Amino acid sequence: MSGNKDSDGGWKNFLWNSDKKEFLGRTGGSWLKIFLFYVIFYGCLAGIFIGTIQAMLLTLSNYKPTYQDRVAPPGLSHTPHSDKSEIAFSKSDEATYKKYIETLETFLQQYNDSLQTEQQKYEDCGDVPQTYKDRSTPEKDPGQRNACRFNRSWLGPCSGQQDSTYGFSSGKPCLIVKLNRIVNFRPRAPSDNQSLPGALQVKTKPNLIPIYCKNKREEDESKIGDIKYFGFDGGFPLQYYPYYGKLLHPQYLQPLVAIQFTNLTLDHELRIECKVYGANIDYSEKDRYQGRFDVKFTVSS
């Protein structure tokens, strides 16, 4: 019994030694020194962390990325976009293509002429391709930039104003194509016509990034039929660039190209590839949307 009392007294004495005024083997002064040490230690660590973050923030701009040396050329995207880029429908069954026309209508709402009337936010940039629209740097002018108007009616039969089904009801579907936004990116028109497909060499205009679609598989060449382009002569005009970012360019409207496939062979799976051509637009095997895309159509009667 005495051994148990000594044992019990040992850990109780370690917990609080009334003779030496020690708690867990340390006096109050010793605990105070340890507490102050860790307060100072972790305070210094926090100060170093906050200081490095603040130093990094000083190198960043609210208006544009500081470093863009590794930014890839813009992606080429299309609407409607479906899983695995497959668009399949029956022209006689509205239920099969309703989701596509709803997607197109939703996307084109922002291009309604009624939303582009405010003179303080929008300006006319012409209906023919022109050179870049330079709106000064944020250092010189931190105010918001005007956006170039883009009339929905320029998309012709793919605007949804003449045909609310965007050609799907007649088996002549439309795609709306755009170059994805990159702050301060200035796409350059092709510098050498020899690098363009034969059909583009006679149609290419200055200040325009042309787009061209063709069959992806050789066996589909005779099944694609005529392809029509609407907008700015089948390309993206340079006066809509550069894009200055959401803070400086909140009303910005990307130029669009509407592509209508007017004579697709029915009841066949057809693969089509579309590419844009520019001096600083490249393609990557790792990213099938960099400067291009391919889509599979299956139109049934």
Image (cartoon, grey):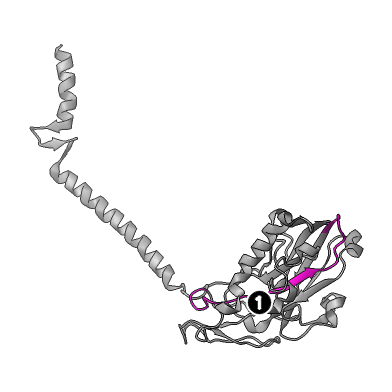
Label 1 crowding class (10 Å Cα cut-off): few <14, some 14-19, many 20+? Answer: some
Quadrant hosting residue 42: bottom left
Residue located farthest toward the left when viewing the structure as drawn: 19
Residue type, label 1: Arg
x then y, percent, for residue 54: 38, 68
The quarter of the rendered structure image containing the C terminus is bottom right
Q: Is residue 205 left or right of residue 18?
A: right
The magenta stretch spans which residues? 246-270
x then y, percent, for residue 98: 69, 58
Q: Residue at x 56, y 80 (%)?
A: 116
- Secondary structure, mark 1, is helix
Q: Is residue 208 above or below residue 13?
A: below
Q: Nearer the viewer, residue 26 or 156?
A: 156
Q: Which residue is mark 1?
A: 152
Q: Nearer the viewer, residue 38 or 88?
A: 88
x then y, percent, for residue 100: 69, 60
